[in-house]
Image (cartoon, helix red, strand yellow):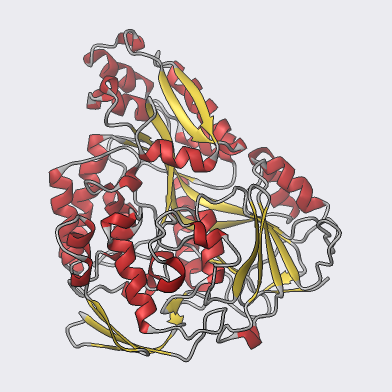
Amino acid sequence: MKKIALLLAVVMLVSLFAACGSSGDTGSSTPSNSGSSTPVAGGEDLANTLVFNLSADPKTVDPTLNSAVDGSHIINNTFEGLYRDRGNGSPEPAMAESVDISGDGTVYTFHLRDAKWSDGQPVTAGDFVFSWKRAVNPATASEYGFILSPVKNAGAIYAGELGVDELGVKAVDDKTLEVTLENPTGYFLDLTGFATLMPLREDIVGSDTEGTWAKDPAKAVSNGPFTVSEYVMNDRIVLTKNPEYWNAENVKLEKVIAKMIVEESTALTAYKTGELDLIDHVPAEEIPQLVASGDCEIYPRIGTSFYVVNTDFPELSDVRVRKALSLAIDRTALTEQVTRAGEMPAMGYVPYGFTDADGKDFRETAGNYYLSDTADIEQAKALLKEAGYPDGQGLPELEILYNTNESNKAIAEAIQSMWKEIGVNAKLTNQEWAVFQNTRMNLQYSGIARHGWSGDYLDPQTFLDMFETGNVQSGNGYSNEEYDQYLHTGMATTGKERFDAFYAAEKILMEDAYIIPLYFNVTPMMCSENLTGWYFAPTEKFWFGDAEITR
């Protein structure tokens, strides 16, 4: 029975890639708002204005520097790449009007449409060249520069082995951009809509590697449907319709207000009273009742929630200890009693939704490794004993670090309790989002840290490449030469050879046990019935360029 439910969940996930939230008069399925239909913030008139909860103040909204979902929501609606996902089943031409692809699939020639920045300056091929070179330049310290790895020489430049001028991108003229890839890359058009590949103006950004320009409305020129008109730290970001956007005549909203309400319960109250039109974080204890009433809808997405183990923490250097911690977690209890939104227990890292060269789902083929969806306390205790820590004796107190959030706290408390069953004690530490990201990236935590990943494109590489040696996105300093070799083989090949290499890479990652998978993500969403035309991608990004609201 559990197997049938799981397969149905996979089918639903895959179908939503094509069907969820198509642009049109209905957008996404929209649960009704039981509160007022006309929110008012600070006494202002909100006619033709969408108010949604961003939850936290983004660490950055600079497309090159951003690595978080909250920043992506803002960037996805203020900037536009060569192609864009609008929810119609495949990436559509955006800044590119068309593209020519060479016979061997390695040279893409993009022909840009006549488009302007929000200050009236033309968008040029040179803006893409500047942005992409900035992303892979080690001096920029972009956490996401690695995502350009399909582009010729990008990996070597990011590693500091070549200069940025060796990148396989050039402006043939103002309206023609030529991109040369290392190898044929089937998902490349999809990738061109990702934040890191958005165009940027050199005269605006210059040598700024802190991203301060992007939070300053006086400097933050953009080429998407909206532009940043107000930024109040820890309170709100206001986006205003960009009259210079090439498709401005079809943008219905005049304004989007992104509020920064961290507490899920507070955001829910604001939604119910009509102060918010859309929220995507709901208190776990409220979800079952809200789903049953039709006020909340669950959106699958390609994402995994997991914990990472600090490779610098000596007491966790024994793989048996790390596996014991993972084995002691009851993932079914975690999803059914704590998160409660229909998540699937994760016994691997790469989520469901990726089809391999044989037409099979990656997760189904890879299997569960040494884990089950419930706890294996006896095996966990046996491993601890073998490692010299019988019943946890001698193992120091571990730290579970998480960013401030009610759900994150509940999950950490549940795992803390589960670990007590094998004699392991853990203390909980929470930090504000931006601080937490830096702490995790710099390995400044004692043992365990919360992590999560949403796919940036529909290929397993979007999950696996974050654990390549030297990738700070891992958050745990993971490094394994054999893993890197399989990853690079997969990145350089196609078909069955590619997927066989990725299967081998994930097996190494899981057997090393420096990650502890918890569950595959879903998003509980509450949306006013007055809001239509919006789209929430399986890659966890909002698109409001086709949205419309009535008051």
Asked whether the viewer can see residue 201, the reply is no
Q: Depth check: give the residue in front, 320 or 119.
A: 119
Left/right of residue 469 with respect to residue 225 in the rendered view: left
Compared to residue 396, the image places residue 223 above or below, namely: below
Q: Position of residue 492 (x, y in %)?
A: 16, 65
Please report the residue visible at 17 percent of the width from the left and 60 percent of the height from the top.
156
Q: Depth check: give the residue in front, 178 or 531.
A: 178
Q: Quadrant of the C terminus?
A: bottom right
Please report the residue visible at 64 percent of the width from the left and 43 percent of the height from the top.
262
Compared to residue 229, the image places residue 383 above or below, namely: above
Q: Depth check: give the residue in front, 384 or 131.
A: 131
Left/right of residue 213 with respect to residue 511 in the rendered view: right
Please report the residue visible at 23 percent of the width from the left and 35 percent of the height from the top.
512
Please report the residue visible at 27 percent of the width from the left and 31 percent of the height from the top.
311
Count of residue discs? 0
Asked whether the viewer can see residue 68, the reply is yes
Left/right of residue 471 with respect to residue 401 in the rendered view: left
